[in-house]
Amino acid sequence: MVANGNGDVHSHYAQFNTWLAEQSAESLAFKRAEADLIFHRVGITFAVYGDDQGTERLIPFDIIPRIIPAAEWRLLEAGLRQRVKALNLFIHDIYHQQNIIKAGVVPAEQIFCNAQYRPEMQGIDVVGDIYAHIAGIDIVRAGQGEFYVLEDNLRVPSGVSYMLENRKMMMRLFPDLFARNKVAPVAHYPDLLLENLRAVAPRGITDPTVVVMTPGMYNAAYFEHAFLAQQMGVELVEGKDLFVDDETVHMRTTRGPRRVDVIYRRVDDDFLDPLAFRPDSTLGVPGLLSVYRAGRVTLANAIGTGVADDKSVYPFVPDMIQFYLGEKPLLNNVPTWQCRKPQDLSHVLAHLPELVVKEVHGAGGYGMLVGPAATRAEIESFRERLIAHPDGYIAQPTLALSACPTFVESGIAPRHIDLRPFVLSGQDITMVPGGLTRVALRDGSLVVNSSQGGGTKDTWVLE
Amino acid sequence: MLSRTADHLYWMSRYTERAENTARMLDVNVQTALLPQSAASAELLWRGMLGISELQAPYDTRYGSLSPQQVLEFMVRDPANPSSICACLHAARENARAVRGTLTTEVWETINSTWLDLKKRLKDKTPERDPSQFFEWVKYRSHLSRGVTIGTMLKDEGFYFARLGTFLERADNTARILDVKYHGLAEQGVLDADSEEGIDHHMDFYHWAAILRSVSAFEVYRKVYSDVITPARVAELLILRADMPRSLLNCMNEVVSNLGHVRNNLSGETERRAGLLQADLHYARIDDILQRGLHTYLTDFLGRVNEIGNRISRDFLVPLAAA
């Protein structure tokens, strides 16, 4: 039975519930085992760092979909458009006039003291003024069902391949479900992505060569890099496949050098060009930055987008929307205490057991304190770290996250979920309905990251 | 096509082919070992196995003494031995994984399943419990990889590089099998003739039949010659018959034709050398080869194949930086 916390069945789950009731336990167990087997064979795995066996693990996949009614999705979509549009305007502004700083909306030190601010980008024009071509915005529902943005991922957000593979898996396992329900399709995402990347080619290039750049097969997200390159029909390159000559990026092919115009790079800024950033990087291309600055190659996402998705900048996003668009934000921000502010810090220190405290530069669910789930000792050790480095932390209230029925060892039980829609910005802003739903498989856990034992579900936007 | 991609495809098929040939040689050894024979000839059998892949020295360092179980372990599951079945199938899979986007889903899933299954089989000790069944499985998986490549991949450069890898590796492996087995047997013939027990003349038949079986040529031999098995004909079949899929000539025919498909402005000399080797095989006579000495002939052949392999790497796969 699919029900919310109060025991009521959400009406948009009614159809699915009827179906679920008709399925025998054996048949469901069989389908779940089949899904596991297929994911292994297809190699939809992620590498686990620090494991010398090179173990590849599956991200647990739950066969109960997360369902979003179309009307709710329309609201979300409008909010996402608005937010990503403002974020792109913000990044452009930061690397040009910096009006938002001059207007006193965002404090200068939040930008210039931020390790993600790239002075190399100052005054550089990028095609269409688009910086975050691919954004993964993490959304949760809480309280009475309103949506909150948890995080804006504007550097190299991943997970879209799981969104696509999960759908493929569900259609393979339960074709009858799709005959009964009008589930909005997502399989055209790679087409949208390619169109988006082609649209931001350097000026004057009518038939651009697009490539996907990966750190290599030992990267945790390698499967996704290979998958997207294949789905778009473009080359998957590593840094060593590229070189710069005559102010142009080329790739080494069996027929000699070939010019590259658009690089969908899944390599962090720091590793892109050893001449400009980390000199020890073997993942990058020497000289890439100078070609980029000359406008002769497009990088997606642009260099320096991290300045807008940092947790210390997050609290200012609603103000950005007001400032650039003159609109009221459609999506909520989670109220955030910035520990660098003395009165915020004292509030946080006084309420640690109720709050979630995050590292400003942390990611992947590491380095955070979930107050209600923490032991007294953990809280005390975090308190010391907070007092020592208040700049490094923000705190948020623990949200009563929505839950979705999920297969667990004891049967079907509610587990907390979030949603990462992928928003593409090029000539227009486009996205496929839904996104990647991640689920915290441990009872009561709020951490959905795959590195921390989270799983995924198919996400249905239902007409 | 990216040079690195071509390189991975080429090595993916080379390693798959190598795993298959290792399995073939081991299978024949395991079966031959069942025949009544002296301890000396049994030892020769397993030494020959190591000699084929030039692995005598690393084996001795590792194990010291020679035993069939240890040779099997070394050639099946030792990850440090680059010719072991485990190492080859792992390398094939890692190369495939590096370019999985270039492969069809079927090719990738076949190669990936082979590796996942292998891990299970090694854990279950299948190679020790039922070696022949295990070697059959390796051969079968190699047939499947090759078949799914031919049956599903677009015939573009990637396909031709994969095929180049298959046939260069096969040319090398067939020549090695023939070289080592042929000489092993010749020595053993002398050995056995001198030994006190003497040896049944029919034993020869089993050894030559074993060589043929190791390259799936036993039935072919019967069909082609309809006659008793003689060393000269075995050599002819495996070197000069263009219609024999694992013969040196057939391998070179395939190498030349696949090279032609990927031609670039550096590869002229490589094509010339491959063509020359093909022509030499095409016009050769087995009597001349045997007169000159099979070992000398095969050593020369291996050197030339190896040189073609190096030139392919240089022309296509690992080109120098910016021209």
Image (tube, grey):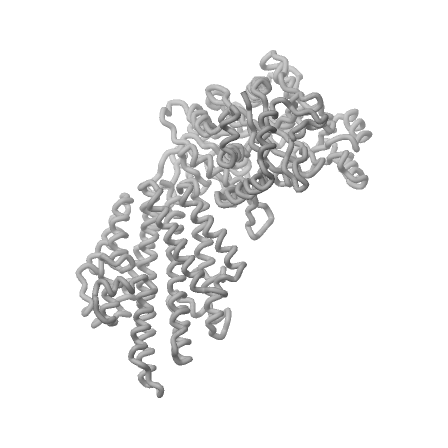
Q: Is residue B303 above or below residue A414?
A: below
Residue farthest along the top direction in this orientation:
A326
Residue B109, given in percent of the width and then of the height, sits at 44, 45
Q: Nearer the viewer, residue A36 or A294?
A: A36
Quadrant (top left, top right, bottom left, bottom right) of the N terminus of chain A: top right
Q: Nearer the viewer, residue B315 or A65?
A: A65
Taking the spot 45% from the left edge, 50% from the top edge, the residue there is B93
Q: Nearer the viewer, residue B68 or B314?
A: B68
Left or right of residue B135, residue A451 in this image: right
Residue B223, given in percent of the width and then of the height, sits at 23, 63
Which quadrant holds residue A453?
A: top right
Residue farthest along the bottom direction in this orientation:
B196
Which quadrant holds residue B26?
A: bottom left
Residue A8, given in percent of the width and then of the height, sits at 69, 24
Left or right of residue A291, residue B295 in this image: left
Q: Is residue B248 above or below residue B319?
A: below
Q: Is residue A159 visible?
A: yes
Q: Is residue A419 above or below residue A239?
A: above
Left or right of residue B23, residue A388 in this image: right
Q: Is residue A90 visible?
A: no
Count of residue discs = 0
Taking the spot 79% from the left edge, 40% from the top edge, the residue there is A375
Residue B76, given in percent of the width and then of the height, sits at 46, 62
Left or right of residue A131, residue B236 in this image: left
Quadrant (top left, top right, bottom left, bottom right) of the C terminus of chain A: top right
